[in-house]
């Protein structure tokens, strides 16, 4: 008894039929066709995508490293050991060596992963709703709403992020923590999302089902939330992953320029990487380990993003935005 | 197209005006150019501070200060730095330095991106495609300053050891003071040696994202109907790929590159920082933000914004030229 699998080939994508009976086991046939909802198809395609799954497994391992590792390791980054300054990896019980004031690099990397992911989470929690809202309003209502909102986006794009960071840092001395940097990145990171959502909504609002919903008396809010946003979900998820990867690199770069995380109680991955650059030739372990860890995190998130993109759009488009 | 251009420029001027006001307001709330004198010991006399305040116009109200700056800009005067040098005089040399760094890098990145993108698309899922994809992913995931430091450590050291003398430099735009007495070939050679690493670093990192872009658009084109038609007419494969495919596949890249160049002229901030180049990015960070100098920040803002606006416009116009289906309205 052969089983055809809907949705495994690019040509075989079937539109989901709402209300269609799940499975068709009652009907006697030579083969069975299993109905899958669109969501099931997408999840399935992602699970079969080697690139995306590689990224997911790698990301999972890094989560284990960052969040379960400290429990196993039991050391703290804030412990200074004056008798073990700048020891190379593998000596005096320091698996990855220590820095100039005797802090354990391994413990630093673990808490750095935690902090960097915290920054990313904060960034997304702020930027995603903002960009979605602005883009949706501009794209759905058009006309003057669109013009005003898009000019606001243009305006915010011209203000240099560094100037904002400096101004905020001098007015709020506590802002150089992971919390502060995450919030600022979020407040300035939604601009490209707004443009993406706007362009999607511009075409989606002309679709027949929107007209149908209108004529059935659906409110604008219902159309936006029930009909348009679910249809733009693919690009939202893809943006989220790619923006998360960018945020990690951006945090590191800002820290390198002297405008990022500078908090004695909390180190970030960016802090470790930018500190390590000064030690590239003298204490190479401080340079390589943080850099490679950062590379792995960003790489894994990008791979997941590409996998999701392919799952939503099974043709061979892999445009990097 | 003429009216399109005019309208875009007008809209950009408006955005720039509001933006300069916004940045001025932001800076005015927190910049204090006198702060570097506060911790002097013994402290400077109060008359010194009063003088300086008067000189820099800090006693005027916020709106008066902005108006003074704006009316100056309209006559081509960008104001003076806190140290008394006119900003307009400094912007030119800064732009030259940044331009020297990015032009070569952009050219190399574009050529590489096209070659690698096309090869990746034509030979999709072959070992060469996987290899290039892998390299691109790694480069995209690296922070600029870390990659640059890696280049400094290995590439510079390796080449210099191989040649036996220092031909590749890791810091600065030229050996300090060389342009004061040397000229001709010697100066050129020295500058070239300083240019290698920043160019390679910038070129490789921008190339990575662009090559993915080119590959995707080439794949799109290769699957299109007119390519099949061209083959069916009896054209050779090579001819269809280069004559019909490549030209169409270049359109998306054009936009991305034009936008990229526009942004880069504001300074490849991190690359400049790593290699200690005194370009636009360093101007913003050290002379502007570092010295609490509003005029410098605003001068930087205007110049870099003009480049962004101009190259945005170039992107739109090129798009319409390359693809006749698009009409600018």
Image (cartoon, coloured by chain):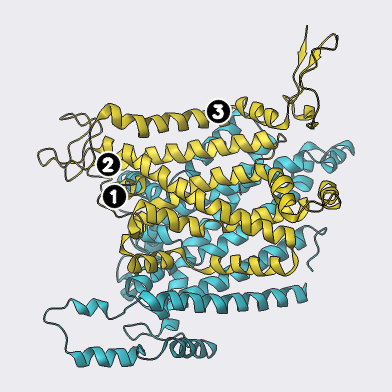
Chain colours: A yellow, B cyan
In screen coordinates, is B238 left or right of A318? Answer: right
Q: Chain of mark 3?
A: A
Q: Secondary structure at mark 3?
A: helix
Residue found at the far right of this picture = B233
For the C terminus of chain B, give its image quadrant.
bottom right
Quote the CA–CA distance across marks 1 and 3. 32 Å
Proximity of marks 1 and 2: CB atoms separated by less than 8 Å: yes
Proximity of marks 2 and 3: CB atoms separated by less than 8 Å: no
User: Reading the chain from its start, which is encountered first: label 2 or label 3?
Assistant: 3
Is the same chain shared between marks 1 and 2?
yes
Q: Residue at x 84, y 40 (%)?
A: B225
Determine the image quadrant of residue B218. top right
Q: Position of residue A257 (x, y in %)?
A: 36, 59
In screen coordinates, is A131 left or right of A166? Answer: right
Disc number placed over residue A53 in the picture, else none: 3
For the N terminus of chain B, give its image quadrant.
bottom right
Quote the CA–CA distance across marks 2 and 3. 30 Å
Q: Chain of mark 1?
A: A
In screen coordinates, is A90 left or right of B186? Answer: left
Q: Residue at x 35, y 44 (%)?
A: A269
Q: Secondary structure at mark 2?
A: helix
Q: Which residue is mark 2?
A: A286
| Nearer to us in this view, A178 or A295 | A178
Q: Residue at x 32, y 70 (%)?
A: B178
Q: Which residue is mark 1?
A: A275
Q: Residues within 10 Å of mark 2 (few under 14, many from 20)?
A: many
Numbered disc in front, either 1 or 3: 3
In screen coordinates, is B216 left or right of A273? Answer: right
Answer above or below: position of A50 versus A161: above
């Amino acid at each position: 008894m052969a089983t055809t699998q809907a949705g495994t080939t690019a040509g075989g994508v079937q539109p989901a039929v709402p209300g269609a009976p799940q499975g068709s086991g009652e009907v006697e046939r030579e083969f069975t066709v299993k109905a899958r909802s669109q969501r099931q198809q997408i999840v399935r395609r992602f699970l079969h995508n080697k690139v995306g799954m590689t990224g997911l497994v790698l990301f999972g391992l890094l989560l284990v490293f960052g969040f379960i590792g400290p429990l196993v390791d039991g050391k703290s980054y804030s412990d200074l050991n004056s008798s073990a300054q700048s020891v190379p990896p593998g000596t005096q019980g320091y698996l990855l060596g220590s820095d100039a004031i005797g802090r354990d690099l391994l413990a630093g990397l673990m808490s750095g992963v935690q902090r960097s992911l915290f920054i990313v989470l904060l960034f997304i929690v702020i930027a995603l709703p903002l960009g979605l809202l602005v883009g949706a309003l501009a794209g759905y209502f058009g006309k003057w709403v669109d013009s005003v909102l898009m000019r606001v986006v243009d305006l915010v794009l011209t203000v240099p992020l560094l100037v904002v960071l400096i101004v905020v840092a001098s007015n709020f001395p506590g802002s150089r923590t992971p919390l502060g940097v995450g919030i600022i990145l979020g407040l300035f990171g939604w601009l490209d999302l707004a443009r993406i959502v706007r362009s999607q909504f511009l075409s989606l609002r002309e679709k027949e089902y929107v007209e149908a919903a209108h004529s059935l008396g659906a409110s604008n809010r219902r159309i936006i939330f029930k009909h348009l946003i679910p249809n733009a979900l693919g690009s939202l998820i893809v943006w989220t992953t790619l923006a998360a990867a960018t945020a990690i690199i951006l945090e590191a770069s800002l820290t390198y320029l002297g405008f990022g995380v500078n908090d004695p109680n909390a180190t970030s991955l960016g802090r470790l990487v930018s500190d390590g650059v000064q030690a590239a030739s003298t204490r190479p372990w401080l340079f390589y380990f943080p850099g490679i860890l950062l590379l792995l995190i960003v790489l894994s998130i990008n791979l997941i993003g590409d996998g999701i993109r392919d799952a939503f759009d099974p043709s061979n488009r892999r445009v990097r935005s | 197209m003429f009216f399109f251009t005019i309208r875009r420029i007008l809209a950009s001027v408006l955005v720039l005006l509001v933006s300069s006001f916004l940045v001025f307001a932001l800076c005015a709330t927190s910049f204090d150019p006198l702060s570097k004198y506060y911790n002097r010991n013994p402290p400077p006399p109060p008359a010194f501070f009063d003088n300086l305040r008067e000189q820099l116009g800090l006693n005027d109200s916020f709106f008066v200060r902005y108006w003074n700056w704006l009316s100056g800009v309209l006559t081509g005067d960008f104001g003076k730095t806190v140290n008394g040098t006119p900003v307009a005089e400094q912007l030119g040399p800064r732009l030259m330095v940044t331009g020297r760094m990015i032009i070569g890098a952009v050219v190399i990145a574009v050529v590489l991106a096209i070659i690698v993108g096309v090869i990746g698309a034509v030979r999709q899922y072959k070992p060469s495609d996987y290899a290039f994809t892998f390299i691109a992913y790694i480069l995209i995931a690296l922070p600029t300053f870390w990659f640059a430091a890696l280049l400094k450590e290995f590439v510079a050291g390796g080449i210099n050891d191989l040649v036996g003398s220092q031909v590749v430099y890791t810091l600065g735009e030229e050996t300090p003071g060389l342009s004061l007495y040397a000229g001709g070939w010697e100066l050129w050679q020295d500058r070239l040696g300083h240019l290698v690493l920043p160019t390679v670093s910038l070129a490789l990192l921008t190339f990575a994202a662009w090559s993915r872009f080119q590959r995707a658009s080439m794949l799109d084109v290769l699957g299109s109907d007119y390519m099949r038609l061209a083959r069916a007419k009896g054209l050779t494969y090579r001819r269809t790929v280069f004559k019909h495919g490549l030209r169409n596949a270049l359109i998306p890249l054009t936009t991305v590159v034009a936008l990229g160049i526009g942004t880069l002229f504001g300074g490849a901030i991190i690359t400049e920082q790593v290699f200690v180049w005194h370009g636009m990015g360093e101007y913003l960070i050290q002379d502007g933000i570092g010295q609490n100098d509003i005029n410098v920040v605003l001068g930087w803002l205007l110049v870099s914004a003009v480049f962004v606006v101009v190259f945005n416009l170039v992107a739109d116009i090129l798009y319409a030229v390359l693809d006749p289906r698009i009409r600018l309205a």
